[in-house]
Amino acid sequence: MADYLIGIDAGCTSSKVVIFDAGGQVVSAAATPSMRRMGYAEGSGIGFEEFDVDELWSLISQCIKDAIARAGIPAAQIAGIGVTSFGNGVVFLDKNGSSLAPGCFSQDYRAKEIIALYKKEGSYDEINAIVKGTLFAGEPGPILRWYKEHARETYDAIGGILTFKDYIMYRLTNVFATDLNVFGGSFMVDLTTMDYSRHLLELYGIPELFDKLPKLASSPEEVVGTVSAKAAAETGLHAGTPVVAGMMDILACLVGAGATDTGVITSIAGSWCINETHSLRVIPHASSNMPYIKKGEYLNCSYTGASASNYEWFTTTLCDRAKQMAKEKGCSMFDVLDEAIRSVDPEQASVLFLPYVASPSLHVNAKAGFLNIDAHTSFAGLCYAVVEGVAFIHKYHIDFLRNAGLPAHVVRLTGGMAKSRVWAQIFADVVQLPVEIVDCDETGALGVAIAAGIGAGVYKDYADAFGVAVKVRPALQPDTALAGTYRRRYAEWWQLNEDMESYWNRQG
C-alpha cells in the first residue's frame, strides 16, 4: 500500500524534502544547500533579493532523490506530494514556460517606491480593502509594477507568474497552478469573491497580466496534477504520483501543528515573525486575512519580516567565542547560548534589542539595534536581549489579535525558537500564555504532507489526520511572578520604538 507522504518546505535560504509515514513520523529528510542570493547591493537602499529559478529546481530535484534514497522505500509507495513555501515574491515564466528572469524573494524591497506611488495615485487603500490586508513592497503586485516601470523588456515577455512553491509544483507536474491560500495571502485575489479580479490588477497597474495568472485551486488538498515522466526521471519519483495544491508556509505550520481549535494562536518564529489564528471575520488592519482551510473562514495574521532570523544574524556575526566554547566542550553552539541566556535575571536585565534585521517591520525604514550597552554589558546580556526582543515583537502581534477580539488561550510555537526550551519559556513568560510545541521539527512540511494525504485518500479529513499524525508536547506554563517585570520591560521596549520613529521617518 502507498502510505508514505512527501512534504516539501521551500524556504528563502534552503529547502527541505521530508518523507513521512502515515503516522506523521519522519522517515527521511534531505535539505538543499543555501541558495545563492542574487542582486542585493548592501547599502544601496534598493533592496534587491533575488534567486536563480533554475538553480531552485536543480537543488530541489536532487534533494528529492536524496530523501527517497535515505528512506529506502520504492518511490511507488509514496501516496502524495505537497509543497509549501513563503508567500509573496514572484517567479517569472516566459510564454514557453521557461524561467525569464531571477525570481524575487518576499524580502525583496525594490518596490518600496511603488507603494508610495499607489498612495499618491489613491489606489493603496482600495487595494487593501479588496485583499483584506496591508500591502507591502515584497508582494507580487508591487514587484510586477516595478518591472513594468523599470524593466519593460522583461515585463512584456512574461507568459506566467507563480510563487516560489508553485514553480516547484509546475516542474513536478507541468501544470500551471497555484492555491487560493498562497495567492490570496500574496494579495493577488479578491478576498470577498475568493477569485481573481481584473479591477485589482488595474489598481496595481498591471491589467495585461490577468490572463497570465495560474489556475486557482480552491483548497490545499486539491490534486492539481501528477508527477510527469520528465520530473520522475529528474527526481526519482514515480510518474503519476498525485501532487496537491499546497499552501503558504504559515498555514502549513498551523496545519502541521494541528492548531485549528478556537483560542489557539500559532506563532512561527522563523525567517518571519508570524502570528495567526482563524475566525469567521476579517480583522481590520491585520497584516492579512487569508483564505483558510475551511470555506467561509479567514486565516487572521499579524506579522513582520524577522523573528528567529535576528538570532541567525547574531550567531553568524557576533558568536565566534560561543562557537569556540562549544568546540572545547564538545556540544552545540546553541547549548552554549542557551546556558548564557539562562544565566540572565530578567529583573536585572538592562539591554533592549529592536529585532528588525529584515523588512517589512513596524516601520518601512526600521533597522535592528541594541540600547543600553555599557562597559558592564556581558555577552550573555546581549544573547538574552536578542531573544527577549524577538519575544517582544511576537507579543506585539499577539496583542493585536487579542485586542481585535480573537480568543487566545494557548500559543502553539513553531520555527527556530521552538527548538530551544529556554527560548520557549521566555516566550511563555513574555506573552503570559501557555506555550505548546509539536513533537516534530518540520511542522511546515508535515502540514503540507497532511494536505497531500487527504488529497490522496490516506486521511479522511484534517481531524482524522491530526488524530493520527500530530503529537503535542506538554505545555510550558508562564511564570506569573515575572508578569510585572515583562510588562515593565515591554513598555520600555515599546517606548524605544516610538522614540525611534522620528529618526526612521527621516531615513526615507
Image (spheres, grey):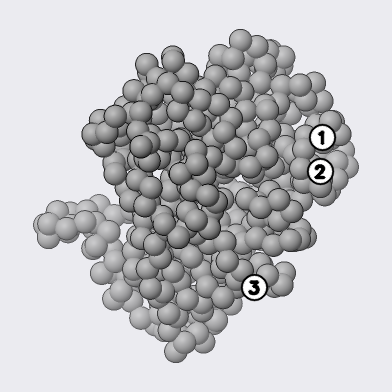
- Residue at figure coordinates x 27%, y 59% from the top left: 334
Q: Position of residue 58 (x, y in %)?
A: 39, 22
What residue is disc 1 on? 197
Cα distance in 3D space between marks 1 and 3: 32 Å
Label 1 vs label 2, nearer the camera: 2
Q: Residues within 10 Å of mark 3 (few under 14, many from 20)?
A: some
- Along the line of sight, the residue nearer the viewer: 301 or 272: 301
Residue furthest to the front: 1
- Residue at figure coordinates x 62%, y 32% from the top left: 178
Q: Secondary structure at mark 1?
A: loop
Q: Are marks 1 and 3 in contact (CB under 8 Å)?
A: no
Q: Residue 321 occupies which quadrant of the picture?
A: bottom left
Cα distance in 3D space between marks 2 and 3: 26 Å
Cα distance in 3D space between marks 1 and 2: 9 Å
Q: Residues within 10 Å of mark 2 (few under 14, many from 20)?
A: few
Q: Which amino acid type is marked by label 1?
A: Ser
